Amino acid sequence: MAFTISDELLGTFVPILVYWLYSGLYVVLGSFDKLDNYRLHSRIDEDEKNLVSKGDVVKGVLLQQFFQAVVAILLFAVTGNGAGAEANQQSSSIAIARQFVIAMLVMDTWQYFMHRYMHHNKFLYRHIHSLHHRLVVPYAFGALYNHPIEGLLNDTIGGALSFLVSGMSPRVSIFFFSFATIKTVDDHCGLWLPGNLFHVFFKNNTAYHDIHHQLYGSKYNFAQPFFVMWDRILGTYMPYSLEKRPDGGFEALATKDYKQTKDYKDN
């Protein structure tokens, strides 16, 4: 008998593996001195400004991924429908592309409103979401460093809704959630590398999200991980420019018009 792994198990664990492989790539890239000229923050800032150790970040991410895997296994068990799932696997490229777009829109919508609410509700921010903002200087493997409750409400439920509403099969979900994972890691990588296709095709990118992690941008740029539409529609979009730092690298800076507003200074 040939040993096979179900699409459901692959859909559960491949995105987790992708997370560590892709973030590990950025750890390696970040170790090269020559790439310091592409950093959004200096190595010193990364070590001194962040309020949590990298060891605790790793443990926090692994805890979130454990709960994420449990929910995914339960979701696949509840929604599995045998022949129907097999039929979905034969979907055309157009159907799969449509499912990707729907899933991206659903995920963005859920995460925008949940993320924004966690900033505006003082209790939720203080006791839950502020954990993620201990990373003032984001880095790749800290992308999913959250309070477990936030991980469940924002990422895990958002992912489940994307899966259910889009109607994608477990096999398609392997690719979608791996793609979403890569995008999320890239948004936190802290490097503005030339030729990065995410920076070319997405306005919501590393610099855009870096603004949100700074104190002055904490009430703006809530959208994640794909588009900026909700920020634009609801007035929480903060435009920025990339400026070269004198000591090397880049800095994402909000435009002057936003710096002069009262809301910009509030926390």
Image (cartoon, rainbow, N blue to C red):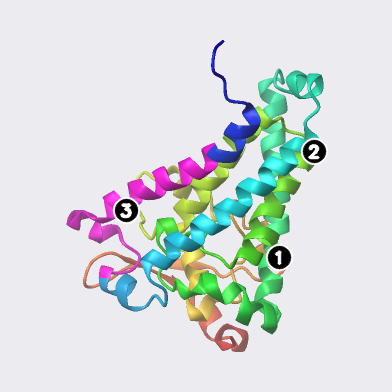
Q: Which quadrant is home to the C terminus?
A: bottom right
In the picture, residue 190 is in which quadrant?
bottom left
Picture coordinates of residue 11, whole percent (x, y): 61, 35
Residue at left offset 40%, top offset 61%: 139
Secondary structure under the numbered disc 2 in the rendered image: helix
Look at mark 3 in the image and give the residue it sits on: 27
Secondary structure under the numbered disc 3 in the rendered image: helix
Task: Using the image, determine if residue 186 lies above or below residue 173.
Answer: below
What numbered label is drawn on residue 85? none
Q: Which quadrant is home to the N terminus?
A: top right
Specify start and end residues of the magenta stretch as a single range: 14-43
- Closer to the chain start, of discs 2 and 1, is 2
Picture coordinates of residue 82, whole percent (x, y): 78, 22
Q: Residues within 10 Å of mark 3 (few under 14, many from 20)?
A: some
- Closer to the chain start, of discs 3 and 2, is 3
What numbered label is drawn on residue 78? 2
Residue 55 seen: yes
Look at mark 1 in the image and give the residue it sits on: 114
Residue placed farthest to the top in the image?
1
